[in-house]
Image: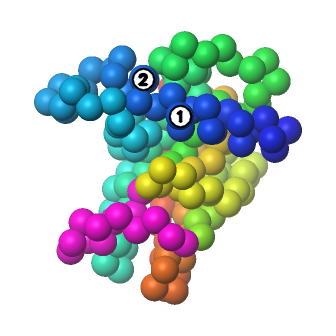
Amino acid sequence: MKNKIVMTLAVLALSAPLAALAMDHGAMDKGHGDHSMMEMGQVAHQEVVDGVKATFKVLSMKEHMKASNMEMPKDLKETHHIMVEFKDAKSGKALTEGEVKVKVQNPDKSEQVKDLMGMQGHFGADFDLSKKGKYGVMSKFVLKDGKTRSAKFWYTVK
């Protein structure tokens, strides 16, 4: 199962440029085919924590697979990919080293806890957000400077 998830994430990461080109990015330069996964989807939450700008996105696996011309695996339980990108708040420099843990509180109060893997300039993991309602997303992260930081927000599935 873990290999299937890793493989799905790898395929998603490698197919991101094609999916990004298929989406409407408005003023984004469409002449380059190397858009990252972070450029896709809507920002779910953004905040500056102790000098670090954290940008969270929640992406539907179904939409990603469709945009990538791929079929959803029938046994895939995870419905969304949660990703976070960290940047130095002053310089804007990407911070790509560290450990990130996310806990998602489901609408029924059950929880999912996962370590986010580092990938192409961001950290991410897949979660099951299949029920409609409000999800509490809580993140703790320790980047290269060794400081423990946290961020939390609500995400609603309609």
Residue tagged 2 = 18
Please report contact status of discs 2 and 1: CB closer than 8 Å, yes or no. Answer: no
> 132 left or right of 30?
right
Q: Quadrant of the N terminus?
A: top right
Looking at the image, which residue sits at the far bottom? 146
In this picture, is 12 found above or below 111?
above
Residue tagged 1 = 14
Query: Quick check: is 53 in the magenta stretch?
Result: no
Sort mark 2 into few (<14), some (14-19) or many (20+) by Cα contacts within 10 Å.
some
Q: Name the residue at 48% across, 50% down.
A: 120
Near-viewer residue (19 or 130): 19
* Residue 157 visible in the picture: no
Q: Name the residue at 26% across, 31% down.
A: 32
Q: Which residues are drawn in magenta?
A: 85-98
Quadrant location of residue 9? top right
Residue 81 percent across, percent down from the top left: 57, 39
